[in-house]
Image (cartoon, grey):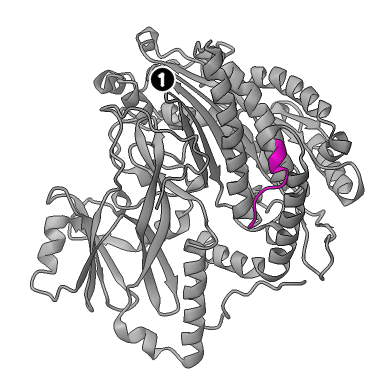
Amino acid sequence: MANESDNGLTRKGKNTDRELPECPKVYHLSESPGHILFFPKCGRSEDPALLVLRKGLGRFLVGSKRKIQSVIDGRNVGHDRAVHGCVGAVRLLSGYYLVVLTSCSFVEHILGCAVFKATDFGIIRCSAPGLFHALSRQHRRDEARYLHLLRASLVENSKHLYFAYGHDISRNCQSQYLLCRPWCSIRTYFNQNPSRDKAKCKSVSLLTPDGMLASDADGGSECNKSMTVTAHQLQNDSWYLADKRFCWNRCAGEMLDDITLPTNRSRRSIRALLLPLICGSFGCFRDSQGDTSLSLVARTSVSRFGIRHYCRGSNTEGEVANFVETEQIVCVQQRYLSSFVMVRGSVPLKWSQPLRDLSWNQKISFNSSGNISSTRRHFAKLVSHYGHVKVVDLLSSRGEEGMLKQAFLRSVSLLPPSNHPSAHVQYFHFDLHEEMTNSNTAALERLASWTKAESSDLGQFMFVSGREESGCQMNLQNGVFRVNCKDCLDRTNLVQRIIACSVLQQQLHAVAIIDSDFSKRCKEAHRVLWADHGDRISSQYAGTLALRRDLTRTGNRTLGGLLQDAKTAFNRYFRAKFLDGSAQDSLDLWTTGYLPGMEDAPLRSARFE
């Protein structure tokens, strides 16, 4: 498949010796009636390998390749094929199924590491051959329905899945660096000394923009946890070190980890074979006239994963729908690195918008019980992970959205006072619908001026090669913008792009880029990257492209853009009424770890409630 660079802005510069090849890893997969064998095609005899014995529901063993091959020595070897990774396992009525990555395409490099997009998967039955046929006719039909949903969740309803080798794409750059791993892609790319980093792992002093130690700064709990990760952990255990909030195959991977047993006294873990995937977006602009790149990475949380009308608001644990972390990265000449992170997510209250009939607009339903605790838990998690939180609420002040906005503001105002995470939460409201009446772009200019000052307070992660001798001193980002509207799609993407544009100017200034021609090219690419980013997030949550695409790409409303918005709005209406229910079922099966029972009917979301 062609590279994901439809806009022509993702250009390949000169490959350096620090860039990994543009070829995915290859694994050997062998199937026979009695077993399944999975191991790296190239490697040593002591590398880990997975053996699945087709007995009962399926018996999973992990050990060295040499040991596993000795176990199956002399057995019938069946069909062999090459795959690109192990994604996890799921359990249905007849037993376990192994999920592997069978196809992927190269996208671009990030910090010298190749990024790929997953395009196809294989689902392999692991149970004894007779178990499926032993099911009743109804259960066999149910099993076929589950397999159809599983296949849909892997390909049709999870459109943008990415992974990388050598770079933990599930974590932002600051989080990776604070882990203090000697093999961190940032240290490797900037040619830092691993032996020196290993010795200094527990003694580095990272400074915030305010000059405070990260361990003492607000939101430092994440830093403290990160600092406990040291070099004794497996260097290649990307699954263990991945941020499970954004690991799209978290449930399937954890199930495979739970059911896999080591052979004899082997200390090997299946985690060394698991490939962490993220669902979101990745785009990169690499300037053809210099060694400079601008990357945009989005990671969607799997804790409350779903589609518009079937997944709104927050659950009791404070996890919200359509929660996406977006990171903007500027890298210059393998010397300067600047990263800025912001998030979006549904209003953290218990609310929904069920499809009761064929009306164009569905009424918003509120569940007042537990709203304060859900909001409190949500912001406590945000502060723990990111530090200060600046909420930018774009809900309308009128109608049902106005009621939702008032409920949100009331919940934020009722959060506990000082000495609590809520003390680091600021709320700002901007009614984008009202301000943009008659395509008034002056409102966006005022918003840009406001975001410039506010983003300066949050800082950005800044790394400069060659300055670690003075004690690892650098700038850290100490907070995030949390932007939301009702869907957290179109208005949210527009405002996040405005914030990101202000931050981009600060990033270019911070890395000492004063070339006006390059700045112009970079800003043009920035518009396209953010427009594509909005389309990918929208296609995942709503099934269509984003609205206001012309405003995001050009800064102006056009007649063609208005006509395209009308078409997109109708497509969303049709999908919500007739297609999204089945899509939500398939995503629930994959992301929630749903275990079907013999008495359960296959997931069927009601189209109307």
Point out residue 472 in the picture as x, y percentages from the top left corner. 41, 14
Please determine whether, in this image, residue 459 is positioned above or below residue 538. above
The local secondary structure at tag 1 comes to loop
Which residue occupies the foreground of this view, 76 or 82? 82
Point out residue 409 in the picture as x, y percentages from the top left corner. 83, 38
Using the rendered image of the protein, determine whether residue 376 is visible from the camera's viewpoint.
no
**Does residue 163 appear left or right of residue 372 in this picture?**
left
Q: Which residue lies furthest to the right in this view?
A: 398
Q: Which residue lies at the image location 85% right of the left edge and 32% below the top edge?
A: 440
Quadrant of the image containing the C terminus: bottom right
Residue placed under numbered mark 1 in the picture: 290
Point out residue 315 in the picture as x, y percentages from the top left corner. 68, 53
- The answer to which image quadrant residue 529 occupies is top right
- Check residue 123 for magenta coloring: no
Dominant SS type (magenta):
loop
Which span is picked out in magenta?
Answer: 543-551
**Does residue 22 appear left or right of residue 586 in this picture?**
left
Q: Residue furthest front?
A: 559
Which residue occupies the foreground of this view, 436 or 77? 436
**Does residue 560 appear left or right of residue 213 in this picture?**
right
